[in-house]
Image (cartoon, grey):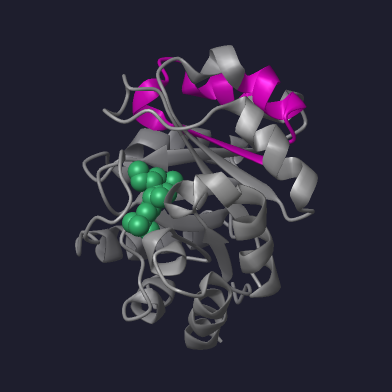
Amino acid sequence: MNKKRKISPSILSADFSALGAAVRQVEEGGADWIHVDVMDGHFVPNITIGPLVVKAVRKVTKLPLDVHLMIEKPERYIDVFAAAGSDYLTVQAEACVHLHRVLQSIRQAGMKAGVALNPHTPLCAIEEVLGDLDLILIMSVNPGFGGQQFIPASLDKLKRLRALLGERGLTHIDIEVDGGVKLDNARKIADAGAEVLVAGSAIFDTPDPSFAVQEMKKVLA
Ligand code: DX5
Ligand code: ZN
């Protein structure tokens, strides 16, 4: 239960013209994972990056790549994201008609399987696939953009998920939270049950992303 909290900086808010340097900066600051937001302009309004960028980031860091697919029909891209060097592949539950099959395919491709839940999606949507998961990502904003406000109701959802995993003896599953995570709410979010905190603008929209990671790690220590 007392797992060490992890920080997974989201490169969505990084300077894409100097992505390698941005990744190295947060690695120096003590980042645990690197969060990569893939958006297709269909599941979410925004279009961001794809497997080529994952492959490029893979070359500059040994940290686990935590790839968050906000795309329709993610099953079409499991193998390419595996080949690009993803360690965790997280799909949105709402985008999967056959979620069980998708999770199995992610593991078969050699990656850890994650599922993300939009703010409106209840925890019961994943109750039947808990045994097939390595990671559950609670979206604390509506996916699509960095820099949004944390939705306060996410705290209660995190607590209920933490309790559910405890009851089922599934505490090896990591609980991750994504959206609106800042220095001033990180402690509260971790106390509610999140083990992995994704932070984009709070890290990269600062003059010194390395220092921003260190500060957030201090808050969580
Ligand atoms: C939002 C993305 C997030 C985003 C978080 O759809 O999934 O990972 O980068 O950005 P902040 O931390 O700025 O809310
Ligand atoms: Zn994300």
Residue 100 falls inside the magenta stretch:
yes
Seen at 28% across and 66% down, the residue is 155
Which quarter of the picture shows residue 207?
A: bottom left
Residue 34 rendering spot, x and y as whole percentages: 61, 53
Q: Quadrant of the N terminus?
A: bottom right
Is 150 displayed left or right of 91 in the figure? Answer: left
Relative vertical location of residue 42 with respect to residue 31 in this rendering, above or below: above
Which quarter of the picture shows residue 29?
A: bottom right
Residue 145 falls inside the magenta stretch:
no
Relative vertical location of residue 138 with respect to residue 77 in this rendering, above or below: below
Q: Quadrant of the C terminus?
A: bottom right
Seen at 40% across and 81% down, the residue is 187
**Is residue 193 at all visible to an observer of this figure?**
no
Q: Which residues are magenta?
A: 78-105
* In the foreground, 25 or 202: 25
Seen at 42% across and 24% down, the residue is 71
Residue 124 rendering spot, x and y as whole percentages: 33, 39
Residue 114 rendering spot, x and y as whole percentages: 55, 40
* In the foreground, 142 or 194: 142
Residue farthest toward the front in the current orientation of the protein: 17
